[in-house]
Image (cartoon, grey):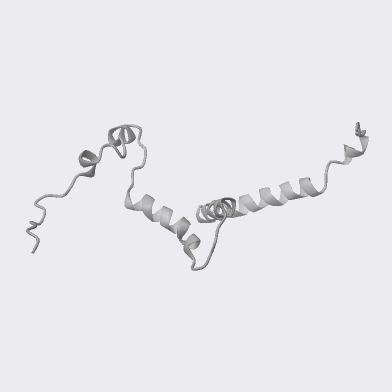
Amino acid sequence: MINARPPTKPVNTSTTTPYFVHYNRALAADWPTASGVIEGAARHLTDRLDITGSRWSVPGAEALLILRAVISNDDFPAYWNFHVQAEHRRLHPAADQANYKLTA
């Protein structure tokens, strides 16, 4: 039988694990620390990566995470307009391209 006592006070991780994060610097700079909100947001973005049997390349996973962040922030319409315009410029180059001479 283990002789364990229940804790008498909450554990303050800012003093027991100072080598992980310099909380004093983060709080002074008004940076977010690992709160439930941040952890929930990270879980919301990454939950689709954990589908059974899926395999992700780093570029594929990064593209999915960026797209999920854009959608979650309600920025998808603006992003899609940018994407369509960029694809149009890529597929239909400027009309003055015929003025350039090949120098090969």
**In the image: residue 63, left or right of residue 87:** left
Q: Does 65 sit above or below residue 14?
A: below
| Occupied quadrant, residue 44 | bottom left
Residue at horizontal 23 percent and vertical 44 percent from the top: 13
* Residue reaching furthest to the front: 1
**In the image: residue 97, left or right of residue 77:** right
On the image, the x and y values in percent for residue 60 come to 59, 54
* Residue reaching furthest to the bottom: 52
On the image, the x and y values in percent for residue 96 come to 89, 37
Which of the pair 45/37 is nearer the observer? 45
Residue at horizontal 35 percent and vertical 36 percent from the top: 30
Which of the pair 35/2 is nearer the observer? 2
Residue at horizontal 82 percent and vertical 47 percent from the top: 92
| Occupied quadrant, residue 19 | top left
On the image, the x and y values in percent for residue 65 come to 53, 53
On the image, the x and y values in percent for residue 55 come to 54, 61
Which of the pair 42/75 is nearer the observer? 42
Residue at horizontal 53 percent and vertical 64 percent from the top: 54
> Is the C terminus in the top left, top right, bottom left or bottom right quadrant?
top right
Total numbered labels placed on residues in the image:
0
